[in-house]
Image (spheres, helix red, strand yellow):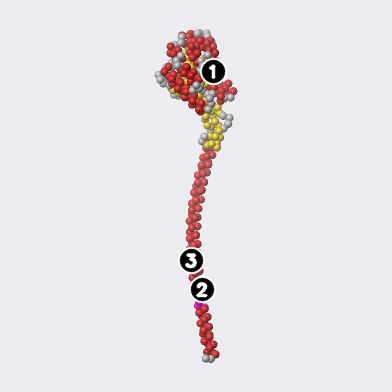
Amino acid sequence: MTIDQIIAILGIVIGSIVGLVSLIFREKDRASLQHCNILLEQSQKEVKDCKKELENQKRIYENQIMQLKSKNAELAEIEKKYQYAREQLNRSHVVQKFVQPVLLIGPRDVGKTSLMRQWHAPWETIKIERTLDGEYRDTEVPFYKFFLAEKRPHFAMEEVYTKVESQLILKVWDFPGETDAQEKIIEVAKEETEALQKISRRKDLGVVFICMFDAEEAYKGISGRTSQYYTGTLFSELRRLIGYTEICLERLILVFNKIDKLREHLPGKSEEELLDSCLKGFEGCIKMFKGICNPDQICEVLTVLDDKQRLKIQGTSVVKAETARGFVRKMASEEEIARLLPDQSSSKAARML
């Protein structure tokens, strides 16, 4: 074989090898390209999914923003109402009530219901009738109100401090004049004492008794019903319960009503002389009060409580002032005490006990 033939064969062999190598590399590049295309497609899908998720999140955030804006508008409206409420509460005040229990006692036709009517005039529109057998009732009579020096948290909004108006209310009990009602008087006195001391947390507060008399009997003689009423078991039982502190007596007021009738029998007599006549005439009844309270807690007042003769009415404001005296002394200033509680009553009965 010649050299030319050998060279020709080598050329063929080398060409075949080069072609084979080139073919191998082309197939490898094709496989790599296909793999890259697959990765690209996957990446594009992931980007598309991510974009879709972002769009969903965007819609969610936009909805949340709209809800927050709506909520913010609601809160702004609430804040506006809240501020209005604060302003109104700052202008207003709360009321704190103090109740002084008062028991009207005495036989029939001495003026208990008439006294209650006078205390209610002119603001009371309910017609107050006299008590019937076995009937008793209570009613509230306003007496005094004042503002405390310091403001306190309002019960409706504790962060708002507002003025406090304290009111003294007389809770007046009217009982029938029969001796059968005296058991109920004792019961009410015990209940009111317990309620008063529980609410006030003070042991020096108690009920007020207003004992009423027909002043004309000081001249004509003490009637059987008056004697029977005041010498019955009421005051002995009161004395016992007061001794055991089951009843606390704040004040004992003796009211001699119908003093105009007594004046007709004793013309020319002064008020003091008429009072002396009443004290002497009812001495036996008054002595039943011994041991019920201290002498400085007793006073007496002359009254005229005839609803049909309003121009003759006297003493109602004095009785009311004496009824509230103990409570006002504990709450008011000296100036207010002097204004509200003028010394118009007397305390001569205390010397008889």
Q: Residue at x 46, y 18 (%)?
A: 237
- Majority SS type along the magenta span: helix
Q: Earlier in the sequence, mark 2 or mark 1?
A: 2
**Which residue is outermost to the bottom?**
2
Disc assigned to residue 41:
3
- Above or below, comparing residue 60 to residue 12 in the picture: above
Q: Residue at x 49, y 10 (%)?
A: 281
Disc assigned to residue 29:
2
Looking at the picture, how far across and down is residue 50, in whole percent?
Answer: 49, 60
- Above or below, comparing residue 279 to residue 147 in the picture: above
For label 1, the SS is loop
Looking at the picture, how far across and down is residue 12, in whole percent?
Answer: 51, 85
Q: Within 10 Å of the Cα at label 1, are there few (<14), some (14-19), or many (20+) other Cα atoms? A: some
Q: Within 10 Å of the Cα at label 2, are there few (<14), some (14-19), or many (20+) other Cα atoms? A: few
Given residues 100 and 93, the one toward you in this image is 100
Q: Is residue 261 visible?
A: no
- The residue wearing badge 1 is 294
Q: Earlier in the sequence, mark 1 or mark 3?
A: 3
Marks 2 and 1, how far apart in space? 124 Å
- Above or below, comparing residue 62 to residue 134 in the picture: below
Given residues 304 and 6, the one toward you in this image is 6
**Which residue is outermost to the right?**
335
Q: Which residues are magenta?
A: 22-30
Amino acid type shown at disc 1: Asn
For label 2, the SS is helix
Between disc 1 and disc 3, the foreground one is 1
Between disc 2 and disc 3, the foreground one is 2
Amino acid type shown at disc 3: Glu
Marks 1 and 3, how far apart in space? 109 Å
Q: Is residue 177 visible?
A: yes
Amino acid type shown at disc 2: Asp
